[in-house]
Amino acid sequence: MVGGVTVPAPRGGPASPRLVHIAAQASVSEATVSRVLNGKPGVADTTRQRVLAALDVLGYERPVRLRRRSAGLIGLVTPELTNPIFPAFAQVIEQVLAGHGYTPVLCTQLPGGATEDELVEQLVERGVGGIVFLSGLHADLSADPARYAALAARGVPFVLINGFNGAISAPFVSPDDHAAMRMAVGHLAELGHERIGLALGPRRYVPSRRKREGFVEALAAVLGRSRDEAEPAVQHTLFSVEGGQVAAGALLDRGCTGIVCGSDMMALGVVRAARGRGLEVPGDVSVVGFDDSQLIAFTDPPMTTVRQPVQAMATAAVGALLEEIGGSPVQRTEYVFQPELVVRGSTAQVRGR
């Protein structure tokens, strides 16, 4: 008996849970957990489902009257969570799944840890009803797409976020990378910048290729640059702070006064590199990120960035997956969502204008 409610023992163990553990897992108060487990009104359905999902994740049996609310497990395979955009997607996906009665099983790929294939095998063995892949091997053009055909052959529905691959038959959800580059380049050009560079991750990733294409097209449309003039203004490194710092070194050597980045993390690296040279952001160099990940509005300076529509993309991905699970075939195509330019303090008019 905890907080006035008896919580069943965990599967495979005699110990009783504490409301504080369930509350922490569900990110709600202990009072809310108590209300849910006692069947009391006044709790939003999404919150109620989060509490029930927390019971599942912690390994406790749901109260008998609430067990029918569980619709099963859904796998979520993500890259490492040090980039804030991935936890942002995971949080929305978890909330939407919980709202439909599903329990998400988060599988994170860590350096030296389990591979995507190994994680998928674990999920299939656990009997998941479907899988959401976030920026996985599907986005890596050097990876073999046959693994996804094999997964489909096993009868496991799945949906893929970020990184369209025409060799894979599945629903895809992506931001419009070309539009993102038009927005970023257009914004810098309006501020008088003519020497604009692009810092990107490795070439083999679909988002990098698309942003590169969009950037080259935008320079041609906005500044009249030919492809031969635009291509050298693109630097491929890593999607990280350190990668942005390396790319910025080469772009600043080229005299760039405006730098567009493939991620917010890279943009932070560009700011670091500029300051390391005694340059001011945005006084000497304007920087545009990509993602609008959590806390990026509170950096120094607050980062101008192109916002991924995380809520809409994650909701659409879950919706497509649940349609598949429910037996309603979803078109094997790419659903493209429009990004949004968010102007903050890291961009300004070029000096001398």
Image (spheres, grey):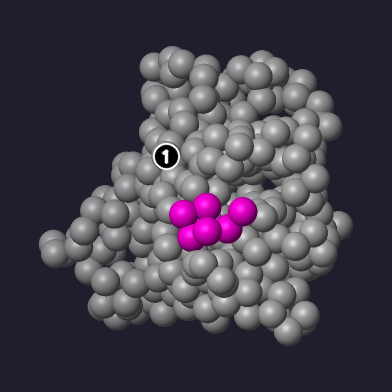
Classify residue 315 by image quadrant: top left
Q: Residues within 10 Å of mark 1 (few under 14, many from 20)?
A: some
Placement of the N terminus among the 4 image quadrants: bottom left
Is residue 57 visible in this depiction of the protein? no
Q: Secondary structure at mark 1?
A: loop
Task: Identify which residue, 350 or 239, lies in the foreground.
Answer: 350
Bounds of the magenta segment: 189-194
Residue at which label 1 appears: 338
Q: Position of residue 104 (x, y in %)?
A: 50, 48
Q: Does 300 appear above or below 32?
A: below
Q: Position of residue 290 (x, y in %)?
A: 56, 55
Q: Does 264 appear above or below 211?
A: below
Q: Position of residue 264 (x, y in %)?
A: 60, 62
The residue positioned 20% from the left and 63% from the top of the image is 43
Instruction: Count every numbered label the image shows and give the total.
Output: 1
The residue positioned 31% from the left and 70% from the top of the image is 33
Magenta highlight on residue 193: yes
The residue positioned 63% from the left and 70% from the top of the image is 285
Is residue 179 visible in this depiction of the protein? yes
Task: Identify which residue, 166 or 112, lies in the foreground.
Answer: 166
Task: Identify which residue, 148 or 307, lies in the foreground.
Answer: 307
Q: Does 347 appear above or below 278?
A: above
The residue positioned 42% from the left and 59% from the top of the image is 342
Classify residue 283 by image quadrant: bottom right
The three-letter code of the residue at mark 1 reads Gln
Magenta highlight on residue 304: no
Most common SS among magenta residues:
loop
